[in-house]
Amino acid sequence: MDPAGLSRVRELARRLGASGGADPAEDGEAGAVLAWAYPDRIAQLRAGSGGAAGQRYLLANGRGALLEGASTLTGSPYLVALDLDDAEGSAAHIRLAAPITREQIEASLAAAIIEGIETDTDPKSGALRARQVRRLDALVLEERRAELNPRP
């Protein structure tokens, strides 16, 4: 368990208890708090997603999810999906979610984020390529081209 994260949750709980309710200015923290409870349900908007069919997301656990219809969450690059209609064999439908930023993901779940170099081959040329990647399970949080140093 992350001691700093636990401390933040306790501080937020203390403030909520003292005020008798949530401060609207702290609504942005809901996603960060929920990420601790549901790290496998952090969802990243897939590139080229959107339109009449809804927005497609990739969950940290590797499953696909769909956010349908008009929503205040439309266009959010990251969500924490709380309630999913988890149909077998197809993408789950997101029924309830909270927005979260990449910065909040990195601060809340720093210990779970893996950084490394991944390699593959270019399908056209067959050349080896490499990229520096930061991941939270199936989600790529950041990537950039990495130089390969061939041995003499």
Image (cartoon, grey):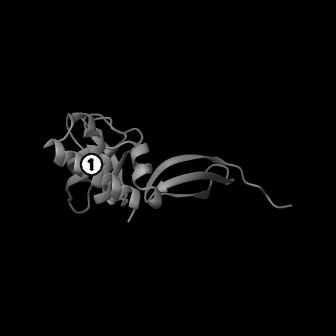
User: Badge 1, how many Cα within 10 Å: few under 14, some, many 20+?
Assistant: some
In the rendered image, residue 11, in percent from the top left (x then y), is placed at 29, 50
- The answer to whether 133 appears left or right of 82 in the picture is right
In the rendered image, residue 5, in percent from the top left (x then y), is placed at 37, 56
Q: Would you say residue 112 is visible in this rendering?
A: yes
Image mark count: 1
Q: Which residue is farthest right? A: 152
- Image point 42% across, 41% down: which residue? 47
The foreground one among 112 and 128 is 112
- Image point 32% across, 36% down: which residue? 50
The foreground one among 36 and 42 is 36
Q: Quadrant of the N terminus?
A: bottom left
- The answer to whether 145 appears left or right of 61 in the picture is right
- The answer to whether 120 appears left or right of 85 in the picture is right
Q: Quadrant of the C terminus?
A: bottom right
Q: Which residue is farthest bottom? A: 1
- The answer to whether 44 appears left or right of 18 in the picture is right
Residue 102 location, quadrant: top left
Q: Would you say residue 65 is visible in this rendering?
A: no
Question: In this figure, which residue is indicated by the disc labeled 1?
Answer: 12
- Image point 18% across, 41% down: which residue? 22
Secondary structure of the residue carrying numbered label 1: helix
- Image point 72% across, 54% down: which residue? 148
In the rendered image, residue 90, in percent from the top left (x then y), is placed at 26, 57
